Amino acid sequence: MLAMDECDENKVMDGRAQDGLSGPAATADEGILSRMGLNDNKAGMEGLDREKINKIILESSKGSKFYENELKKERQLNQRIEKMMEQKAKITEQHLGKAQAQVDKMTSELERRRKLGRMIVHVDMDAFYAAVEMRDCPELKDKPMAVGSMGMLSTSNYHARRFGVRAAMPGFIAKKLCPQLVIVPLNFDKYRALSAQVREVFAEYDPNFLPMSLDEAYLDMTEHLEQRRSWPESTRTHYISASKTEEGKDVEVPQAASEVEGLSPVLFDDSLSDFAGIPDPFGNAEVFGTSAEEAVREMRFRIEQKTSLTASAGIAPNTMLAKVCSDKNKPNGQYIIPSDRQAVMEFIQDL
């Protein structure tokens, strides 16, 4: 069904072995690499050989429209930098002193208004497009693969990232980095359908959640957590679904009649007592706690049960910090900053 594009691996290896450039060409290449070189600030790309990967990226892109466009952007950037440097040269000690006083005043005002009372969660699906394709085509799970085209990739799985392949990279460059890479065409109808299922879960924790794209959203779970403190264990009990077929399709399962009025419905929201003394028809049960960490873990669990896809999350007092936290324990993990000033400041200083 999905055929791998063939590539001359020997040429790729020859490119890796070439000596570094020198002279004016080297200067131009170093400049453009600041734009198109490997950005390994992404989960699954730790410890890569940046120098080797950047050399392949540079050599495989030369002469392409992509390269020429990046070169044009680099020239425009350099022009802006020159103007900024001219402005910097005109700054006096008096200007700096005045600016410092303004910043100090602004900092004091912001500190006075600091509020840490909300519990904000940023949820980011793990390699969403790639994960959907691997779910629907299991033979891709153990192969480096990406979603997009030879012109541009939208995402890549974690196997491909070990070769330096990532989102916003042209597919033809990715194939030089990883000749065995499988590139799957985008299917937005499928991604929108899966995103709708994920959002159904979000809405039960925050009806006013803020979607940022098909695969990420912000939730304010403050009110949910207040209600959750009084929830009985049965309401916080969820089942590892035994109703999934091998193809991952849902099979209708009976629902218990007992429900807690006024509380958010849950996946397989059945009390353990309903099945006392009889075999559990749903598989293993898991009970989640009442804390923010437990609520988010439960939400991620339910997303995976509903879609067979994993999500990572960040929990913090504001959206910006929550966004940063969601990338700390990817894939399929979460990270929390406690809602106190010292914890927030320590986290920021360590970034």
Image (tube, rainbow, N blue to C red):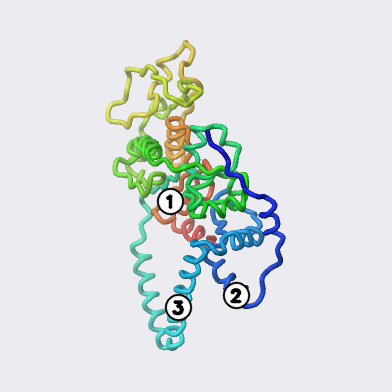
Against 213, residue 137 (above or below) is above
Q: CA distance from mark 3 to mark 1?
A: 39 Å
Locate residue 24: give its quadrant: bottom right
Q: Which mark is residue 79?
A: 3
Q: Is 211 positioned to the left or the right of 242 in the image?
A: left
- Total number of numbered labels? 3
Q: Position of residue 183 (x, y in %)?
A: 53, 44
Q: Position of residue 319 (x, y in %)?
A: 39, 53
The answer to whether 188 appears left or right of 31 in the picture is left
Foreground tag (3 vs 1): 3
Contact between labelled residues 1 and 3, with CB atoms less than 8 Å apart: no
The numbered mark at residue 316 is 1
Answer above or below: position of 293 versus 263: below
- Answer with mark 2 or mark 1, whichever residue precedes in sequence: 2
Report the residue marked by disc 2.
27
Q: Is residue 17 left or right of residue 305?
A: right
Q: CA distance from mark 2 to mark 1?
A: 43 Å
Q: x%, y% of residue 306?
A: 42, 30
Asked whether 125 or 36 is in front, the reply is: 36
Three-letter amino acid code at the position of disc 3: Gln
- The residue drawn where x is 45% and y is 78% is 79
Residue 19, above or below 206: below
Residue drawn where x is 56% and y is 61% of the image: 61
In front of the other: 73 or 323: 73
Crowding near the residue tagged with mark 3, few <14, some 14–19, many ≥20 C-alpha atoms within 10 Å: few
Of pointers 3 and 1, the one earlier in the residue sequence: 3
